Amino acid sequence: MTRSISPTLAPVLGLLELNRPVIISRKEMEILVCEAGVNWPVNVVIQRLSKLGWLKETEARGVWEFVPAERAGSFSSGDPLLSLRATLTAHPNVPVAVALGSAMWYLDIADRRPDVTEVALPPRSHVPAAIRRSYRVVRHETRLPPVQVRGIPVHSPASVLVHLATRPTDVRSWAAVFDGLPELVGAAEEMDILTEIEGRTHATHARFAYLVEGIAPKLVERLRVQPRGKVWFGPRGPLRRHDSRWNIADTILPFPPSELGSQR
């Protein structure tokens, strides 16, 4: 598919091809149009480039995807994080990060990516419409800042681990999580785990110990979790198993996590 360009807009497109932004905001386009020496209003430039297939609208208002010439047509990259990139371009202070199994995928721990990307925001924080429409949103507040993976905030291994223990019902596929759980524990620094879990409820500590004791028994010993009243691992309902050591009533895990091999 041939995409034409007028001589007037050619300098703008030249800068776009040179800089190769995945997405670009209206403000960034204003700067680019000025650098290109084009005297047209930025809204007109955006409208023309969109009509010709060089820019595509994103879920975030005022942000567009740039479609470089190498795609040989006005086709989106199909990047599942495109709406997240666009939202963070428009609103860089939104406290959102890729979470759970999706984080494990982008951290190169999981072998497969969830069908719908999972993102987390702190409780009671506003969820932008683009995020709500594009992703599965869960609520979790971390103690550690996210890591940056290809310019996207992603929960660290320690943050993912503590999230699993804090809200196990946020997980859609525990079988998939179990596939990468030993690697996740191995990738998490002990001090990061201690930072993430400090000050959280006894239930979170008990679930964490139950979840990783087969993989990291020495770490569990250092946490010094003391069993108390019954703690549910999953929604209240028929038990799959009961763990007497941690007094855990497990209703969701596919098999006892103690069966996972020791890593450290």
Image: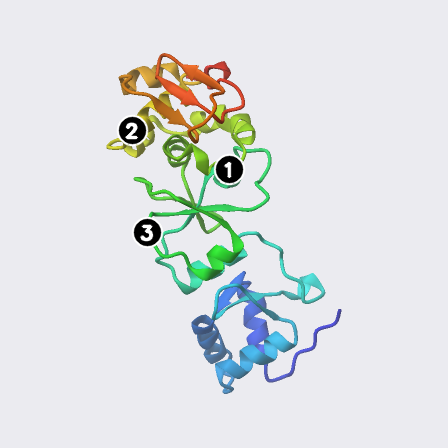
Q: Which mark is residue 124?
A: 3
- For this orientation, the residue located farthest to the bottom is 39
Tell us which disc is closer to us: 3 or 1: 3
Give, as a three-letter code, the residue at label 2: Leu
Tell us which disc is closer to us: 3 or 2: 3
Q: Quadrant of residue 173?
A: top right
The residue under the point 24% across, 32% down is 199
Helix, strand or loop status at disc 3: loop
Q: Which mark is residue 194?
A: 2
Could you tell me if the residues under marks 3 and 2 are in contact, i.e. CB atoms within 8 Å?
Answer: no
Helix, strand or loop status at disc 1: helix
Q: Rounded to the nearest whole Å, what is the CA distance between mark 3 and mark 2?
A: 25 Å
Give, as a three-letter code, the residue at label 3: Arg
Could you tell me if the residues under marks 1 and 2 are in contact, i.e. CB atoms within 8 Å?
Answer: no
- Rendered location of residue 233, percent (x, y): 41, 26
Q: Rounded to the nearest whole Å, what is the CA distance between mark 3 and mark 1?
A: 23 Å
Give, as a three-letter code, the residue at label 1: Gly
Which quadrant: the C terminus? top left
Residue wearing tag 1? 101
Q: Quadrant of residue 53?
A: bottom right
**Which of 186 and 14 lies nearest the eye of the viewer?**
186
**Which of 244 and 191 lies nearest the eye of the viewer?**
244
- Rendered location of residue 50, percent (x, y): 60, 74
Give the vertical position of 4 relative to 190 (above or below).
Answer: below
